[in-house]
Image: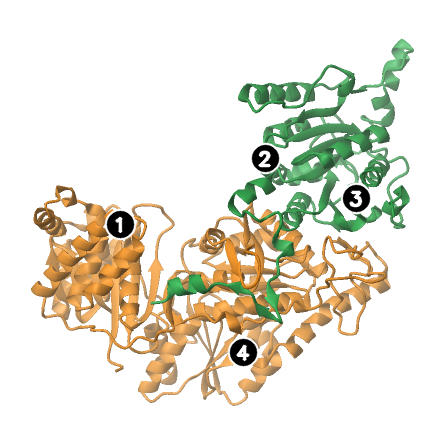
Amino acid sequence: MGCIDFTWLIGGPQGSGVESGANVFSKVCAEQGYNVFGKREFYSNIKGEHSYFAVRVSDNKIHSNVNDVSLMASFDAETIFRHFDEVAPGGGIIYDSDLEKITTDDVRTLDEYFKERLHKLLESKNKPFTIPGVLEIAKEKGVHLYPVSFRGLLADLAEQTENPKLRGLVRMYNVLGVSLSLGLIKMSLDSLLQSIDSIFAKKPLIAEINKQAATFVYNYAAAKFTDFTYSLNGITKDPDTILAQGHFGTSVGKMVCGCRFQSYYPITPASDESVYLESHELLEVQNDRPGSTLVIQTEDEISAMGMMIGSALTGTRSSTSTSGPGFALMTEALGWAGINEVPVVITLYQRSGPSTGLPTRHGQDDLLFAVNAGHGDFPKIVYASGDIEESFYDTGQCFNYADIYQVPVIHMMDKFLSSSVITCKKFNPKKVIIDRGQLLDKVDGEYKRFAFTKDGISPRSKLGLDNGIFWNTGDESDEYGHISEDPDMRIKMMDKRMSRLDLILKNIPDDEQVVSFGVHDHTIISWGSTKGPITDAIDLLKKDGINIGFIQIKLIHPFPTDYVKFLLKDAKTIIDIEANHSGQLGKLFKQNVLRDIDYYILKYTGRGMTSTEIHDSLKKIIENKANKKEILSHGA
Amino acid sequence: MALKLADYKTDVHNDWCPGCGDFGIVNALQMALAEMGIQRDKAAIFSGIGCSGKTSHFINTFGIHTLHGRVLTFAQGAKLANPNLTIVAVGGDGDGLGIGAGHFVAAGRRNIDMTYIIFDNGVYGLTKGQASPTLKLGEKTKSLPSPNTNYNVNPIGLAVASGFTFVARGYSYDVRHLKDLIVKAVNHKGLSFLDVLQPCPTYNDINTRDWYAGVDLAKESMERHSRIYKLEDTHFDPVVHIAEEAEVNEKLAQALIKSLEWGNKIPTGIFYQNEIISPYGDRITDKIPNYLENPPSSQNISQNGLSTTDVSKILDSLKV
């Protein structure tokens, strides 16, 4: 055990089936008992630009990608040009031998900036600007080359199966790439065929053709290429394992915790969640008639926010899901929800800003924006999940926080999470507790929506509740919800609302606020999806005999100052790791904890961090060779 | 116990200017609610921002005073989550046809069963009389530094083009007629729109109460010349009777043409009504069959603090 750590990369033009190929590969590996971490990178484009998927497979628990690719399956020239250098010595490249005459100028989607860098490298090694040129570099490094004529394979297959339609069926190249790879690493063929069956469950004829092709190509690779370093024969499977796509945590989490209304406007990388909710809108309910999630696609994010609030006023658990540009439009109404104490959950799948930024790429750029979103002072909660599994349980908690404290909750997710696929323990809905706080189901006597109470939280009526009439206004109001500009009332109402922040810090358990992975002389602070690569990097360093601490801050606002101070009292060097330019958590930390950050490890290329690059930077820090700001840049 | 008109009034101090047309609209709305006998806790008035935004505080039902331009979004969300509520959204013409115009059009396309009333006075009153979207090109109300440089939007025409299935105009000084229109609008199955001409006595010195009453015209002829007339007093039939394209197109075109009438003759009443187009709630039942019996706001989501939603099929499908 503990010897398989294999990264497979598939690339190709957008629309050519890179993602479905990767899904098949991930599923087969997971079914063979391996832990899987995969991540997709793609351009803001529908067809033609380069996309790729890196799937890491291990018999250990893994939570991130590494820099080194063990096997690359390419069926176009661009993938070879862009990724040949990532394949490590001992690894392999499967490529289409029909591409051997292609030069860099033949690939129109290779941008000038990349080409310039590639040409410099090729010049320095005295190689031509061609596929053979880059492949020679790989070969000299010790990479195995596996040339295969994809066209030839399909022609042979067409002949063997007496099905001339298969000839030139370019659409099948992704299946060929996956099957060749699995043949090469001796992964179970049965598992591959089952996967194809389940993916094409509704199209049995297409499944049959794909299975024929897969078998043929698998056997071809297994017989022809016998020198490959890696062989993955399968290990014992944990029966409780699922293969989860990025948004499953929040979308299934919303179903389970009783979110019954979601309004949204299409935006990358958030809309997958809403579309998934809508395609699973009918819900089975124990001992009750069927339920449903009403998903409404609105005319813009302002409307998504307004509708969500309107729905929440009826007592329905309500939510929206968006990314930075959409959230920017929502902030006016966020303040309305704040002053009217409406429990809503905004799932914020961040991407790279500012403005449209890198619209399909990763970033943790919106932490301070979320904390400060909306004009005026009002209480809100900003809560960040570190991985997909965590996001399932956190989703339920975000709705509880919203209901209990009657505040808007911003649940921070990001593109790294949304485009990952992982194996994890099956979500356990029995662990999801539903606490609606002081939501009333009946009202006796006079009712005041914003009644002053000891803990600052007023029992909450809902639209349509008998005798529960109330008023809301974006103006300052009295206890009934009618407009008031009285200065004394203003003080009381502001104090009532803002006292919520202390209550939140007091009542939310410490381990829901901050998760400590141990504190050492060098301790990392971070938040969100960096958790995976950080914990993997820490494990790597442990093997070198180096112990590094890590606290994952989940409750970002209100900031858990006392608990963070307590946790870090023995840490000597604080390292802030974030996927943004300015170290936004670091700023919050300094402002609240009144302590400096010693080192930053930052990445803002739009590509997710790998554990390799975090490991390398941490090592430099330990060895006193690091810059104050270590800037990461791995990834095409 | 039957509810009386007084039951729909709050004791909140009303700070509108003396003579404001808004009073007539609030009165008509309260009268309509009383006439229909709608339970106070089954009705919700949503309002936008501006003078008209305060309306929800003067009516003794649920009252949700929202944001500038966004009233329809809040109101639709509430109606979708709880379709048993009677929902009336109100706001000014700047609110609904300026900053909120996108929501106006989108709401028309959805046709959710509720009512939207625009208080249409041609000016932004609460910010001291700037030109609003319905003020005519070249008109100069008293606090404008120079004549209006924008063409006016046609609320009736825009509503008809956007898909509203009940489109009418009222006049705030004909409270009884307005009340009747509100009752019809609320009873309409689908999204109803009421454009209410509402003189702003403080900032609009052109479309005044006297102007609507035709006092200037009367001076010339010594006869009564109210500019306002009622479509129902003519042979105008606004209703789409059969589900045929030609019929629908004819009624839409007729409404649009009628909406362009202005000047010495201003039509009020129903311009267009189509109950053949399905309300949004019915469209939802095509995909969620029990939506109307078990809408989001009615659903039980937990028992003893634990989730009752059964996602085991989904989770099993993710198993490897």
Q: Check whether the beta carbons of the residues at disc 4 and disc 2 lie within 8 A of each other.
A: no
Three-letter amino acid code of the residue under disc 4:
Val
Q: Residue at x 82, y 61 (%)?
A: A447
Q: Residue at x 21, y 66 (%)?
A: A71
Question: If the image is split into quadrants, where does the N terminus of chain A sit?
Answer: bottom left
Q: CA distance from mark 3 to mark 2?
A: 24 Å
| A64 vs B297: above or below | below
Q: Is residue A174 left or right of residue A284?
A: left
Three-letter amino acid code of the residue under disc 3:
Ile
Q: Are marks 4 and 1 on the same chain?
A: yes
Q: What chain is colored green?
A: B
Q: CA distance from mark 4 to mark 2?
A: 51 Å
Task: Determine crowd level at label 4: few under 14, some 14-19, many 20+ residues with C-alpha closer than 10 A.
Answer: many
Tell us which disc is closer to us: 3 or 4: 3
Three-letter amino acid code of the residue under disc 1:
Pro
Residue A313 percent coordinates (x, y): 68, 55
Q: Check whether the beta carbons of the residues at disc 1 and disc 3 lie within 8 A of each other.
A: no
Determine the image quadrant of residue A454.
bottom right
Three-letter amino acid code of the residue under disc 2:
Ser
Task: Determine crowd level at label 1: few under 14, some 14-19, many 20+ residues with C-alpha closer than 10 A.
Answer: some
